[in-house]
Image (cartoon, helix red, strand yellow):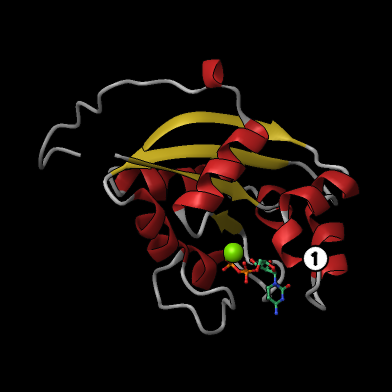
Amino acid sequence: MERTLAIVKPDAVARGKIGEIMRRFEEAGLRISALKMVRLNKRQAEEFYHVHRARPFFDSLTTFMASGPVAVLVLEGEAAISTVRTIMGATDPARASPGTIRRDLGTSIEQNAVHGSDSRESAGFEVSYFFRGAETFDYDRVDRRGGG
Ligand code: CDP
Ligand code: MG
């Protein structure tokens, strides 16, 4: 079992896509083990994205991430990190595969609807950035096979 952090970014929250994005994760068999809404301030967005601090897009990205509330979730499952990255699609919605979240819901390389951790190391940092242990939950998915 692996854990990863996903964020429904401010653009997707504003366009009413929280449910649509969570549905795609759940339908891939991932378990939502924590979730909440947060409004990051600029400094918090900079902390969260500190690995990108030297990148030319850092100021614009962190301003965008602080521009409105986000929905933050911990997703758990086999190979959860790569599964989420596949469902999200490539960073640039124009280059993302058809059927991915970013292709369907993203509007620009910056406003690309969703974030997902890219490694076990970043997932560890990102989950603990938003959630304490008592805020994540273990439960069994009891999906009916073939029934939906
Ligand atoms: O989110 P992902 O891991 O796919 O991409 P990243 O390279 O870690 O970049 C983090 C975020 O910065 C992206 O999701 C975009 O929102 C933004 N970005 C941007 O605005 N312009 C770029 N050229 C690259 C990324
Ligand atoms: Mg990344």
Q: Nearer the viewer, residue 77 or 101?
A: 77
Q: Quadrant of residue 130?
A: top right
Q: Nearer the viewer, residue 94 or 35?
A: 35
Q: What residue do we see at 30% from left, 51% from top?
A: 79
| Within-10-Å neighbours for mark 1: few <14, some 14–19, many 20+ | few
Provide the residue designation for mark 1.
53
Q: Is residue 17 above or below residue 82?
A: above
Horizontal and vertical percent position of residue 38: 73, 35
Q: What residue do we see at 55% from left, 52% from top?
A: 122
Question: Horizontal placement of 52 versus 123: left or right?
Answer: right
View extreme (bottom): residue: 95
Question: Horizontal placement of 142 versus 84: left or right?
Answer: left
Question: Horizontal placement of 108 versus 95: left or right?
Answer: right
Q: What residue do we see at 61% from left, 39% from top?
A: 72
Where on the image, by quarter, is ligand 1? bottom right
Query: Tag 1: residue type?
Result: Arg
Q: Quadrant of residue 125?
A: top right
Q: Is residue 129 above or below residue 58?
A: above
Q: Is residue 101 above or below residue 136?
A: below
Q: Nearer the viewer, residue 106 or 16?
A: 106
SS class, disc 1:
loop
Q: Is residue 60 above or below residue 23?
A: below
Horizontal and vertical percent position of residue 19: 52, 42
**Image quarter in which the C terminus is found:** top left
Q: What residue do we see at 38% from left, 65% from top?
A: 86
